[in-house]
Image: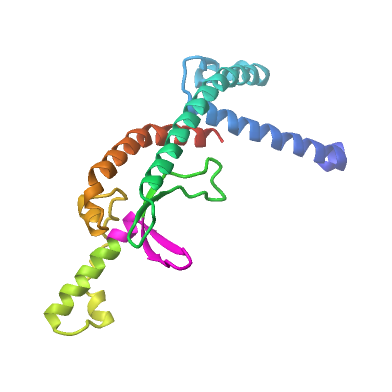
Amino acid sequence: MSDLIGRKAAKSFSKDLECFLQAARRAVRWVNAFPGDDLGILSPKSKAVGLERWIKAIAEACERRSSMAAGEVERFLKMDEELNHLVFEFNEARQPVRFRSIICRRECPELDLLSPAEPRYRVVEYFDRRTGRRSSRDVSSYKQRLKNQKQRERLSIQLGRDPLPDEIAALQPSRPSRKPSPWLTDELISHCHLGKHSGSINNHQKRMAAILEEWGSVRALLRALL
């Protein structure tokens, strides 16, 4: 286009076109997120309406959906605050932290615009009493580790010695097995020597699960709008 309208004008046009396409892609995301019956002008039978009317229809549709989006954002923030409260409540009840304590944490991935992420229960697998330093593993990964450890122990009893690496590898299924659930079980709670607190822990878990289903669906909707 530089040969037709000049280099400067072509550069300006390209910039404006990119802005338009970004806005169009955003409009498509919003329309898909909030389907409605107000988009007849955009249907295939209305192709001949012209660009100006099409843009006007998109603008009106997005304006209506902006109020819907605002309501969803408010709902999400309210549920997110409830989740934060549950996380703090759980961790406060689990004090003081020790080896094999169960804690609850929310990660904050840098690339996640809606962080923090979903709360996850974790098991403290290292704790230094002198320094207070600790490390923890998410419940799903910890369950898998326990499963592998039990398999090695059974194999060791069968062989009468410590198994070799290739003997341990032979225990693994040919197909990838399903990851263990991230939720706490009575067995894991007992393993962590928290059996007398199982009632309060399970109650907390049920309260969190009740919020997470709706929180997750609203979060997915907001992600689709970004």
Q: Is 206 in the magenta?
A: no
Residue 135 lies, with reference to residue 51, above or below; the image says: below
Spot the residue most to the left: 158
Say which quarter of the image contains residue 70: top right
- Is 185 or 130 nearer to us in this picture? 130
Q: Which residues are magenta?
A: 123-143
x and y percentages locating residue 6 in the rendered image: 87, 40
Instruction: Name the residue rendered at 19%, 74% in the picture.
Output: 153
Q: How many marks?
A: 0
Say which quarter of the image contains residue 52: top right
Q: Name the image quarter holding the N terminus.
A: top right
x and y percentages locating residue 41 in the rendered image: 55, 16
In the displayed structure, does residue 41 sit left or right of residue 94? right
- Is 9 or 183 nearer to us in this picture? 183
User: Is residue 174 at all visible to an observer of this figure?
Assistant: no
x and y percentages locating residue 134 in the rendered image: 44, 63
x and y percentages locating residue 30 in the rendered image: 54, 28
Residue 12 lies, with reference to residue 74, above or below; the image says: below
Instruction: Name the residue rendered at 39%, 66% in the picture.
Output: 126
Say which quarter of the image contains residue 160: bottom left
In the displayed structure, does residue 161 sit left or right of residue 73? left
Q: Name the image quarter holding the C terminus.
A: top right
User: Is residue 35 at all visible to an observer of this figure?
Assistant: yes
Residue 132 lies, with reference to residue 45, above or below; the image says: below
In the displayed structure, does residue 124 sit left or right of residue 76? left
Q: How is the image coloured?
A: rainbow
Residue 57 lies, with reference to residue 169, above or below; the image says: above
Q: Is 135 in the magenta?
A: yes
